[in-house]
Amino acid sequence: MREVLTIAMPKGRIFEEAAELLRKAGYLLPPEFDDSRKLIIDVPEESFRFILAKPMDVTTYVEHGVADIGIAGKDVMLEEERDVYEVLDLKISACHLAVAGLPGTKMSDIAPKVATKYPNVASSYFREQGQQVEIIKLNGSIELAPMIGLADRIVDIVSTGRTLEENGLVQLEHIVDITSRLIVNPVSYRLKDKMIDELVERLSEII
């Protein structure tokens, strides 16, 4: 019986772009794959098993070995700092992390506050700028924080900038460019190296 490669994929835009990439690399994914509401999808023809997860959880699944490989945004990898190998930049879902706020407003001199989904990245960034800030962790609608007076600034993902614009915010500083990466569990890389190397090779050819 052929070994199965378990792949953790984030739901949403990255999932759609990654599935398209796998098809271009010659992998046969069933048509219903894109619309499935299942959390685990088996593709026996390719000896693949897909685990569909929240983007922030992909690196955890790969680190703990429940997935051999995963597709994760560089933002998640910087924030989570998991023990995984990054083997390929897939060049999909390009965006960047940025500092944003209300136009014409200065950071408070006394205990400036920054709201974000990325507390580790934000802390490191402001520390490097020589600024001491209080980080407020939020899980969604980060743009609200400056509008309601919860924070002076936010650190968040920006792709087109439209969400910032619609909420009256402007980008103030560019932190780092983000794309999705192929990551591998170190033990899986030893045990399933042929399958993983073939996947990396086929994807590399079309990127």
Image: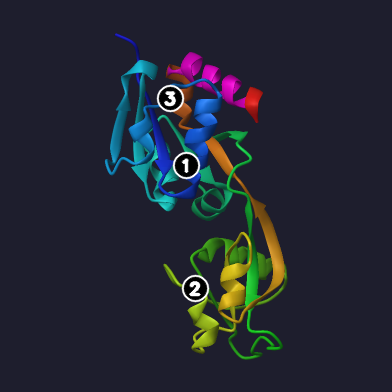
Label 1, secondary structure: give it: helix
Badge 1 or badge 2: first in the primary sequence: 1
- Identify the residue position indicated by label 1 in the image: 16
What residue appears at the point 50 percent right and 27 percent down from the top-left corner?
23
Report whether 104 appears left or right of 166: right
Q: Calculate the distance from the C-alpha at mark 2 to the C-alpha at mark 3.
A: 36 Å
Q: Position of residue 174 (x, y in %)?
A: 71, 64
Would residue 187 appear left or right of 151 to someone viewing this image? left
**SS class of the residue under badge 3?**
helix
Q: Residue furthest front?
A: 31
Left/right of residue 20 with respect to residue 110 in the rendered view: left
* Residue 205 sits above or below residue 163 on the image: above
Residue indicated by mark 3: 188
Query: Which of the marked residues, 2 or 3, is nearer the chain's N terminus?
Result: 2
Looking at the rendered image, the disc whose residue lies closer to the viewer, 1 or 3, is 1
Above or below — where is 4 with respect to 124?
above
How many C-alpha atoms fall within 10 Å of the one at disc 2: few (<14), some, or many (≥20)? many
Q: Residue 13, position in %: x, y?
A: 49, 49
Give the x, y percent position of residue 166.
Answer: 57, 76
